Image (spheres, coloured by chain):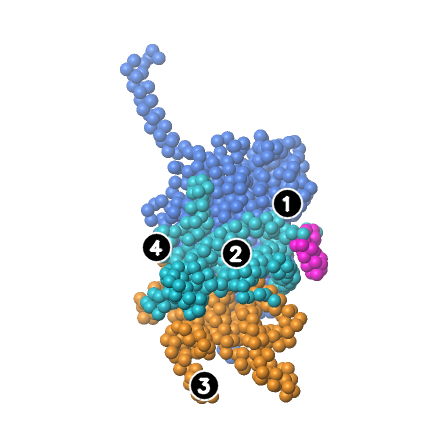
Chain colours: A orange, B cyan, C blue
Amino acid sequence: MLALAADFIRRFARNRAALVGFVLVIVVIGIALSAPWLFPRNPLRIVGRPEIWPFTTSRFPLGTDSLGRDIAAMIAYGARTTLLIGLCASLTATIIGISVGATAAFFGGWVDELLMRLTELFQTIPNLIFVLTIVSILGQKIEYVTIAVGIVTWTPIARLTRAEFMSLRDREFVQACRSMGMGNLRIMFGEILPNALPPVIVLSSLVIAGAVLFESAVSFLGLGDPNISSWGRLIGDGRTLIRSSWYICAVPGVAIMLTVLALNLVGDGLNDALNPKLRDR
Amino acid sequence: MRRIVVRRLVQIIPLIFAVIVLNFVLIHLAPGSLFDVMTSEQQVTDPAMLDQLRRTYGVDQPTWVQLAKYIWAVMRLDLGFSYRQNAPVLQVIMEQLPATVILMLAATTIALLVGVTAGVVASVRVNTIWDNLISFGAVFFFAAPSFWLGIMMTVLFAVKLGWFPVGGMRTIGSGHGAFADALDVMHHLVLPATALGLFYAATYARVMRASMLEVFRLDFVRTARAKGLSSGRVIVAHVMRNALLPIITLLGLQLGTMLGGSVVIEAVFSWPGIGSLLFDSVMSRNLPMVLGVLVLGSLLVAVCNATVDLLYMRLDPRIRVR
Amino acid sequence: MSRFSRREFLMTTAGAALASRFVGSAAAATAPKTGGTLTATWGGFEPQSLFVPGGGGSSPYFTSTKVHERLLRLTADLKFEPVLALDIKAAEDFRSYTIKLRDKVTWHDGKPFTADDVVFCAMNYWKPISAGVSLDALEGAEAIDPLTVVLKFKAPVPEFFLKSVLAGKSGLLIPKHIYAGSNIITNPINNTPVGTGPFKVKEWVRGSHVEYLRNDSYWNPGLPYLDRLVIRWWRDPASRSAAFEAGQLDIGTFNPIPIPDIARLAKGGKIVAETKGYSNSAWVATVEFNQRREIFKKREVRQALMHAIDRQFISDTIFFGRARPSIGAVHSSNSIFFAKDVQDYPFDVKKAAALLDAAGYPVKGGSRFKLSLVSAGWFEENVKMGQYVKQAFEDLDIAVDLSVPDRATSLKRIYTDYDYDVAISNNSGSIELIPSTTQYYTTDGIVKGAAFRNATGYSNPKLDEIVGKMTVETEEPKRIALAKDFDRLASIEAPILPMVDLEPVTIVRADVRNHSTTADFMGESWAEIWLDR
């Protein structure tokens, strides 16, 4: 087991870009965790003169926004929001996706047909509109935004899980389990799922990245939770000032981009590490 | 072949049906119906007037009756009447659809041209500085939120350099010649289409690169090279055609996300298309309009998916859809 | 002729010719030039329809008033000028008014404008739909002859009040021959309205602009000066700034561009910022306390929270100086009814805390109580105000849950469901206080489901009595005194009060003339605007 892990880490580390991504993710997590220590007060508090440029005073290293709030504090707390929504949304999506995909593949027949039509339904509706509608219905709270994003991003996971299950379903070891008398559920979750998981994990990292982008778009359009600090909302707030204080839009955008970038690089690295066949680089 | 086509297209019908039902339920669940919005905007409080308006907007009947009526109407190609715009839904959508179509076509063109070219160059010059630059660029544009890209591009190219307009689709009151008009629209189109398309360009670049590399290794390429065909012809004639298959699949599948993306881009650039129409309609609980746009959008996506499947079948004879 | 010598004659005629050249050019400098296209916008979005009979907000008001005219209009110095009504005279007992109409006015489709149209509007449109409560006392309307209408009321009606209604937002005139027998609210002609105004709708390109052409048979010969009027909409203020700079936009009403951009654009003198023209559409940002909550039944609590808000900060930072702290319940630009000697609420956190302690809400376990704050999300400034007010209350150890819903949800939560503890909203009141201001305070202003009126549930018989007297008091000085009583009581009670008086600004190119001349410029027909190009 340890040898497998070491081998995995070695293969992952060979991909330098993935390493960079990994480091970036750690940095973002670090900022998110340490936000309450670095900035003890509520980041949404008005603390200074509005529209101070970044790198001009040491009190506000990243400047202040149109109301006079500390952008550095909002970026730090925004990291918490981003990671929270990213993780929870992708967890929701993964749970839904795996359940749907596994059930469809395992039972086949009309169950498969029905679930695949359902998947197609959710894939056909334009994602962002769906999220906006759900947020309008449930309300502008961070929990509801998370649920909405999760509901919209499960389809690729379902498809992948189904494909993996289908290829594993007819393998010998499953038939062996069946002949031993194992129940369906036990086979599904005990035997097939652990083997099907690796590609799904890779996909999950991309789903997290997607969730981050969705949340930022929703907040940008003004539908996010006004009680918490969010990178997307900062960009939206800064739009009227792009002529004079365009840094208000630029800084949080860079933060989003680096986070999504990092997640994608890590996803690529995981992919390479888990699929040694595609060693082409 | 024709049977498969017909079967594929027929499969779309239950899908549209499900889209309608799902969205009808969702919009009805949202607090604040169109009726509430319209009556408070119209300052209507007289009970008799309220009843009359309820009848006019059709909200006095039970929900399932409203749903049944709507489905029956859609089957007759009547998407209903939008009381907010005081016009039939289909008419309003058709008025604003061309703007979005132009935007999406332009974005897709940019995405294909830039993405495919970048992917080919990166694969041909694999592991050189070009490859690294292009790969980095691809990941950058994939990760950057499109609305943020749009704003940053506006700051640089429209505000600071003044090369492009800040927003809108046309310059009103300018020369009305058809050619001048088209040029004017194209001038306004550059920034929004690029902002929308770069994300897909990044995807296509990466996929194209991986696909090309995979095809390079295949036997028939070596055969072609052995036959003495020059590198250039080998690439274009044989490799690309095969490597393009995944791109075509992606193209079809991303129509849905692009429609969602156009909502944000249209908001950033004040582009008068159905993306902003849809956003406004969700905000004002304009049920007929939201359903209309979603039904048409889903129909488009479903038809696109079917077309892509069929195209894929034609292009790669090894694949047959069950 | 014989009295003048030939030389004198030559000199005088030459002199006269010379003089007339100067006079002529001076006259030419002030004589309006005809022709040209004016491109306009305003600081909000495209309307749902070019004409919304029930109101629909500022956007359709802007587009419909170029086509539909009214009987009167209010000038910037608060005099009523005739438009389609040459004279409006009150009877001795103020229970009826005789309106003499202008002759030879036609609708855009050629049919004549007559007293029948006015009777139709009064009874079928204004009373039930647009004016509602304002014309409660209207009993009947009769056309004595094709150019004379008599309006009959069941109680005395003050003259300024009636003229205000007829010149205001709800007094638009619509053609009987088109609307009779139909549902006025849903009639499809509302998308291409037909009126008597100086401009006719040519084309509405949804999502982009509406184009108007000059009405060649307008009743005022020589007007309008413009050939074409285009109203264009953008979704965000930065685009409008750019349009001004690129010369694509001539005039924008109601804060079209981000306020920090105004100074930049005004440099060079090509573009001007104008503050006149809003006195009859005075915008405020209000804060209100839901009386259905136990905690707000105590006046001291409401007053405490008023003291907790730093309104100078809101004016300076959120509105970039284009607003000022309100005093009392009436906008400070209201030169008739504004009163300074009312209860004011200067920013004083200590006083607020003391009031809350005295009212029985001390700090217990780190917090006094919890509030839900709803800030209507139709203006970006409301979003910021919500965030600031939340912080201000939190500084008083009050826990606040903030929501900033979209327009539809805001209207529903505040005015239908009454689902809020504290709400931030807006009001654009006319100079005449009844009903646009008073309906936020009176018991009959409580109408569930109707927006922009009494949503707090505040009900005070004394206040109702003052407003009731004001409604039938026909002597101006007595009326003004009653209004001040109303203002004083409303300010002390503070169920809902304006936080800041907005000072909207019109951005216009320097070569546009004759703009901002009336009390509600956005809602005027713009017949007299001309371009000095």
Q: Position of residue B10 (x, y in %)?
A: 64, 59
Locate the N terminus of chain C by quadrant: top left
Callout 1 secondary element: loop
Which comes sooner in the sequence, label 2 or label 4?
4
Question: Nearer the observer, disc 4 or disc 1?
Answer: 4
* Label 2 CA crowd tier, 10 Å (few <14, some 14–19, many 20+): many
Q: Looking at the image, which is closer to me, B234 or B72?
A: B234
Provide the chain ID for the residue under circle 4: B
Q: Residue furthest front?
A: B227
* Label 1 CA crowd tier, 10 Å (few <14, some 14–19, many 20+): some
Q: Residue at x 31, y 20 (%)?
A: C14
Give the magenta range: B50-75
Q: Name which residue type carries label 4.
A: Lys
Disc on res. C187: 1
Circle 2 sits on which residue?
B275
- The answer to whether residue B81 of the structure is visible from this angle is yes
Q: Is residue B68 magenta?
A: yes
Q: What whole-number distance in Å separates the C-alpha atoms at marks 2 and 4?
A: 28 Å
Disc on res. A4: 3
Q: Name which residue type carries label 2.
A: Gly
Q: Is residue C56 magenta?
A: no
